[in-house]
Structures are given as C-alpha cells and as structure tokens.
Image (cartoon, rainbow, N blue to C red):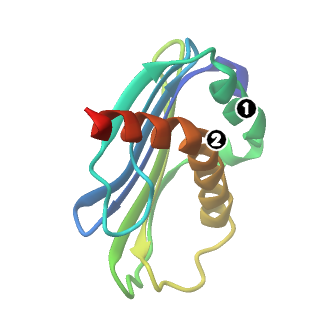
Amino acid sequence: MNKQDIQKIRIDIVSDDQSVLSMLFDKEGTISRQGNGTIPADPFAVMSQNDGSIFAKLIDQIDERVFAHAGVYDHPDKSGQAINYSVAMQAEDETVTFFEFRLGTQTKDVGELLPYFDQYISSAVLMTNEWYDKEKAASLAH
C-alpha cells in the first residue's frame, strides 16, 4: 500500500472490552470520534464533515516503511489492564492494511512500532480535540 492510495483510516483503543477511543477519517472529510483514549471511557460519539485537512495531515504523517510490518502483535506480557490498539487503513480498491497491538497498560519492551502508532494516534486525537469538545458541549447544552 502507498499512503496516496488510502481512502479511510480507522483508529481504535479498547481496554478491558470497553472502547476508550474510536475514530474514523475518510478522504472526503468525514470524521467520527468516540472517547479520548483514557480510562474511564468517554461514551460521547459524534460524526461530521470537514474539509479533509485533518485526513491529509494524518496521511502526511505516515511513514510508508511501516506497511511492511502490518499485522497483529500479541504481546505475551499483559501486565496491568488489557489494552488493544488498532489502526486500519483502507485503499480505494478496499484493500485493508491493519496494525493491532494486544498488550497490558504496564507492558515493557513493546518494540518500536507501537510507540510510532501511539504517537500517530495521539496526533489524531490532538487534531480533533477542539472539534470533539465543541460538539460535546453543544450536545450537553440541549
């Protein structure tokens, strides 16, 4: 997969079978988000359209060298709370490149790929925080 082929990006973090973050971005500008990646989980979910600039920034941040390492990484040490990180990227032909990390919140020696995706996920959250908080405040005001 080349990053120019990516049409959709999905990011999920699940801890103890509870979604703490779920995000979907598409090339046309649709964004959806639930949660902020922390425990306890924030159940508020919202979806809207934007100009596609956040998607473009997320695409720019991808280092294409990671594609060779796609797959599921099931760490044998799941110290702390169980947590799964997943990032999926869908191409125009509907091919999906998927990264999943299964570990614990206290797991050590996670390699280099998880910290890369942790930073990528953090960036996606930061880019959508203002929008998410504004939508949440507007829904609570009703």
Whether residue 41 is situated above or below residue 99 in the rendered picture: below
How far is disc 2 from disc 1 in space, using C-alphas?
Answer: 9 Å
Q: As drawn, is 19 to the left or to the right of 106?
A: left
Give me the disc on residue 127. Answer: 2
Tell me the mark number nearer the camera, choosing from 2 and 1. Answer: 2
Residue under the image location 56 percent in, 48 percent down? 125
Say what secondary structure mark 2 lies in.
Answer: helix
Quick one: label 2, few (<14), some, or many (20+) residues within 10 Å?
some
Q: How many marks?
A: 2
Q: In the rendered image, which quarter contains the C terminus?
A: top left
Q: Does the CB distance between marks 2 and 1 fall below 8 Å? A: yes
Q: Nearer the viewer, residue 75 or 31?
A: 31
Residue under the image location 64 percent in, 41 percent down? 127
The location of residue 96, given as percent across then percent down, is 47, 30
The location of residue 105, given as percent across then percent down, is 44, 79
Q: Is residue 23 visible?
A: yes
Mark 2 or mark 1: whose residue is earlier in sequence? 1
Give me the disc on residue 57. Answer: 1
Name which residue type carries label 1. Answer: Lys
The location of residue 39, given as percent across then percent down, is 36, 69
Q: Nearer the viewer, residue 127 or 56?
A: 127
Residue 33 image-quadrant placement: top left
Give me the disc on residue 12. Answer: none
Residue under the image location 60 percent in, 44 percent down? 124
Q: In the rendered image, which quarter contains the N terminus?
A: top right
Name which residue type carries label 2. Answer: Met
Quick one: label 1, few (<14), some, or many (20+) residues within 10 Å?
few
Residue under the image location 51 percent in, 28 percent down? 25
Furthest-front residue in this view: 141
